[in-house]
Image (tube, rainbow, N blue to C red):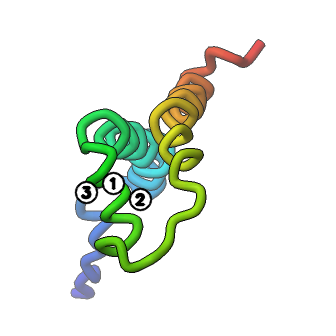
Amino acid sequence: MVEKESNTFDDFGNSSCWAYLTSNWLLPFGGVFAVLFVGFVMKKEEVKKELSNEDELKIRWFSAFYFVIRYIAPIAIVLILLNQLGVFSS
């Protein structure tokens, strides 16, 4: 009798289902939570210290970066999620 080799994806179901779930849903949700955390939970000084390696590196465009993290990135990621739901398709 030939034993079937165990494949991690086959043990939990179809691998394409897991790939679809992670790439189309879990990654965008993680991105939204990450930018919301950095933009609205962390203090601005903490973010700058993290980006500049405890003020060892010079950050020239921090204000623009912080604006994008707070306002543009969450909206863009939510638009991507809405596109996945088919809101924008005709």
Q: Which residue is mark 3?
A: 12
How far apart are labels 3 and 1 at the CA level?
A: 39 Å
Amino acid type, label 2: Ser
The relative height of residue 11 versus residue 64 in the rendered view (above or below) is: below
The relative height of residue 82 versus residue 53 in the rendered view (above or below) is: above
How far apart are labels 1 and 2 at the CA level?
A: 37 Å
Q: Which residue is mark 2?
A: 15
**Element carrying mark 2:** helix
Q: Nearer the viewer, residue 38 or 9?
A: 38
Instruction: Judge the density around disc 3: few (<14), some (14-19), many (≥20) Cα neighbours within 10 Å.
Output: few
Q: Residue furthest bottom?
A: 2
The relative height of residue 4 versus residue 32 in the rendered view (above or below) is: below
Amino acid type, label 1: Val
Residue found at x 51% / y 65%: 59
Q: Nearer the viewer, residue 72 or 5?
A: 72
Q: Nearer the viewer, residue 30 or 9?
A: 30
